[in-house]
Image (cartoon, rainbow, N blue to C red):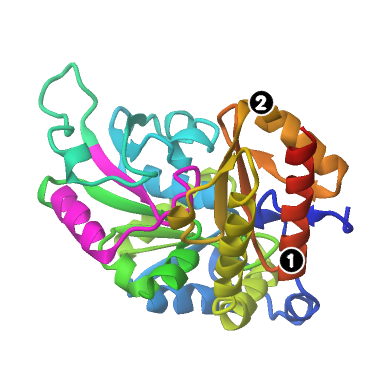
Amino acid sequence: MSHHIELRSDTFTKPTLPMRQAMAAAEVGDDMVGEDPTVNQLEARMAQLLGKPAAVFACSGTQSNQMAVWTHCHSGDELLIEASGHIANYEAGGPAALSGVSVRRLDGDFGRLDLKHLEGQIRGGNVHYSPTKLLCLENSTNIGGGRTYSLEQLDRVCSWAHQNGLKTHLDGARLFNACAARGYTPGDVAAHFDTVSICFSKGLGCPMGSILVGSTEDIARARRARKLFGGALRQAGIPAAACLYALDHHVERLREDHANAKLFAELIAEIPGVTVDLNGVETNLVFFEIDPKLGTADQISQKLKERGVLMYPAGSPYRLRACTHLDVNESQIRQAAEVLRGICIVA
């Protein structure tokens, strides 16, 4: 499949040779008892980077998110989240299955929530209702279109949550992308949240791994959740070494992915029958609509695949998503746009 242009997701990235070398050279121990020096180094570095006392390494973003839900809620509680949020839609019913927690979806703005969406939504006191205990945000958004939050909006929303007795968790799967787009730091964002999860297996190009940061007390509870969910690892310094390598070498280059996404959006915006909001392309995700006369998103996706371009339909009948990452260069982006143009013009 290496000859294909891979635009399905940044999860398809392959570890670079230097990353593999870092993994092979990793000093390891038994992380279950806290004796893997590379994991300990990664956790300490991420805690410091996000300005929190503690961190815990996890297998995946879903796992670290669900560890946070279990940490902040009890069975019978509910969380609030924007309707398209990953925790609500793409984590296999984790809040209900693992923590007994209800999910209440609120319609927001491109995956983002503000006070107008939240005020009056907290429930408690009445025995008919699940008590609202947690607010989950996503930055950058995924199905929301790769959009990001301003620090002002995060402050406004999280202050409201805390004033109303809620805990706050950030699904920061692509937080480094949001930081590259907005010019703020992970610590600037994390200051507003009780816990933050970050994936290493997306734009940072690692084969696996996620981190959850928070208070000493919350992370101690999250470690218990990790064990309960089957995520306690042994010689985890091998994947942790990839994460440390990525922090040193793959963060600044995220801007290249954003530039390629913007380029792709500009190129396909010129194709008859393709609609894309150029101002909405903030990070490495490009969502676009196909005129129904050209076919469905599934049909267009299949035609692209037959011509060597891999891209997912994006949840609605005529919407597709392209995701840029470190394994796609500018030349391939231009080629992919030309392939789409050829399909649309023939149709």
Write the residue at 89% across / 58% down.
Answer: 3
Tag 1 or tag 2, which sits nearer the N-term?
A: 2
- Up the image or down, 337 lies above or below 14; here it is above
Q: Nearer the viewer, residue 233 or 347?
A: 347
Q: Is residue 134 magenta?
A: yes
- Judged left or right of residue 178, residue 191 is left
**Which label is found at residue 293?**
2
Secondary structure state at the residue bearing disc 2: helix
Could you give the CA–CA distance between mark 2 and mark 1, rounded to whole angstroms? 32 Å
The answer to whether residue 12 shows anywhere in this view is: yes
Q: Quadrant of the C terminus?
A: top right
Q: Nearer the viewer, residue 76 or 180?
A: 180
- Indicate whether 192 appears above or below 256: above
Secondary structure type for disc 1: loop
- x, y (%) of residue 43? 49, 72
Task: Read off the magenta span.
Answer: 133-162
**Few, some or many residues within 10 Å of mark 1 (<14, 14–19, 20+):** some
Q: Could you tell me the amino acid type at mark 1?
A: Asp
Asked whether, in this view, residue 203 is left or right of residue 279, the answer is: right
Answer whether residue 272 is magenta in the image: no
Please provide percent x and percent y for residue 135. 28, 44
Looking at numbered disc 2 in the image, what kind of residue is underneath it? Lys
Residue at image location 55% in from the left, 73% down from the top: 255
- In front here: 242 or 288? 288
Residue 227 visible in rendering:
no
Q: Which mark is residue 327?
A: 1
- For marks 2 and 1, give the one nearer the viewer: 2
- Give above or below for 119 relative to 220: above
Label 2 Cα neighbours within 10 Å, binned few <14 / some 14-19 / many ≥20: few
Residue 150 image position (x, y, % from top left):
29, 62
Left or right relative to 54: residue 121? left
